[in-house]
């Protein structure tokens, strides 16, 4: 069963468990980091605010690319882009009755 089957609609995918002085698992530098809990996964990761902001910027950048790219094309880095179907924002068509 995938991660989708373990999360209820009311639960959050990402949650900040706590913050502390430590090393970011993304940039490997000392920062104040957040211990992040991912729904349906027993392990926690640590990330600094800079790297978390950088990931958010990447999501926005790739989202803007979807608006101008055709379905099936790849980004300049060679990563496949997925078209968003339906109004719910998921990358698959919504279920029909």
Image (cartoon, helix red, strand yellow):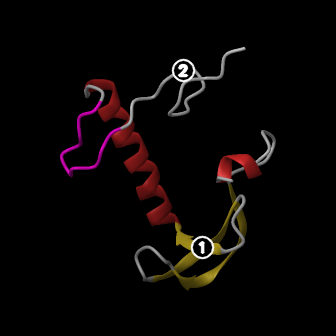
Near-viewer residue (50 or 35): 35
| Nearer the observer, 33 or 64 | 64
Answer above or below: position of 37 versus 84: below
Check residue 86 in the rendering and tell me which mark sits there, or answer none: 2
Q: Residue at x 54, y 71 (%)?
A: 47
**Sooner in the amino-acid sequence: mark 1 or mark 2:** 1
In percent of width and height, residue 10 lies at: 81, 41
Q: Residue at x 50, y 60 (%)?
A: 52
Q: Residues within 10 Å of mark 2 (few under 14, many from 20)?
A: few
For the residue pair 9 and 4, the one nearer the viewer reads as 4
Left or right, 3 with respect to 91, comes to right
Badge 2 element = loop
Span of residues in magenta: 72-81
- Residue 75 covered by magenta stretch: yes
Q: Could you tell whether 54 is left or right of 15 in the image?
A: left
* Disc assigned to residue 45: 1
**Observer-nearest of 49 and 64:** 64
Q: CA distance from mark 1 to mark 2?
A: 31 Å
């Amino acid at each position: 069963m995938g991660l989708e089957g373990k999360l209820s609609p009311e639960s959050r995918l990402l949650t900040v468990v706590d913050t502390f002085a430590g090393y970011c698992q993304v940039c490997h530098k000392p920062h104040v980091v957040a211990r992040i809990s991912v729904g349906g996964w027993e392990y926690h990761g640590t990330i600094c605010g800079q790297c978390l902001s950088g990931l958010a910027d990447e999501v926005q950048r790739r989202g803007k690319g979807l608006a101008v790219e055709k379905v099936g094309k790849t980004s300049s880095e060679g990563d496949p882009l997925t078209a968003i179907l339906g109004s719910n924002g998921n990358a698959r068509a919504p279920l029909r009755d």
